[in-house]
Amino acid sequence: MKKTLMSLTLITFLSLSAESKYITELSDENFGAEVLMSEQAVLVDFSAPWCGPCKTLGPIIEELAEENHLEMKFAKLNVDNNNKTAAAYGIRSIPTVGIFIGGKPVDGFVGLRNKEQIKEILKKYFKSEIQTEEIKHERK
């Protein structure tokens, strides 16, 4: 029993601490370069390691990042360790997800959403969708 519990604890720790290769870890220091100066839309997951709903949302964001990393950038900011950025964007509840384009927050949500709900929000900011809209606008 003790060995099983220790194994489960280790697996949980490793899965929570593992970084996704499609999600950029943000800090107060790199937020400007990674988000505000990005040439593509960026989803920012404002969260904290102790937050239960954040732990539920994290894997959903990771799946979306893996499936859609060519369409937009995905990033995560630990609000406990980076309170200047969190305060600058008025983050008072977590999880909060913000979508940034051209250095400005344009959309987002607070709390949990399922994968399909999030994807529906994101689709309009995908690179291919934005380019399609630009082409339509240029032809008018």
Image (cartoon, helix red, strand yellow):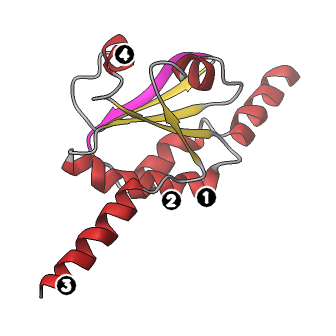
Q: Residues within 10 Å of mark 2 (few under 14, many from 20)?
A: some
Name the spot of residue 140 as percent of width and height, x first: 83, 20
What amino acid type should be assigned to the residue bearing mark 1? Glu
Q: Residue at x 50, y 18 (%)?
A: 29
Q: Is residue 89 above or below residue 27?
A: above
Where residue 128 sits in the image (x, y, percent)?
74, 41
- Residue drawn 30% across and 69% down? 10
Q: Secondary structure at mark 1?
A: helix
Q: Earlier in the sequence, mark 3 or mark 1?
A: 3
How far is mark 4 from mark 3, CA to CA?
44 Å
Q: Residue at x 60, y 35 (%)?
A: 125
Lower sequence index among marks 4 and 1: 1
Residue 63 circle label? 2
> Residue 55 shows which numbered tag?
none
Quarter holding residue 49: top left
* Span shown in magenta: 103-111
- Secondary structure mainly formed by the magenta segment: strand
Is label 4 in contact with label 2 (beta carbons under 8 Å)?
no
Q: Tag on residue 89?
A: 4
* Rendered-image quadrant of the N terminus: bottom left
Q: Secondary structure at mark 3?
A: helix
Residue placed furthest toward the left: 1
User: What is the CA distance from the residue labelled 2 to the residue labelled 3?
Assistant: 30 Å
Above/below status of 52 relative to 103: below
Residue in front for this viewpoint, 106 or 73: 73
124 displayed left or right of 7: right
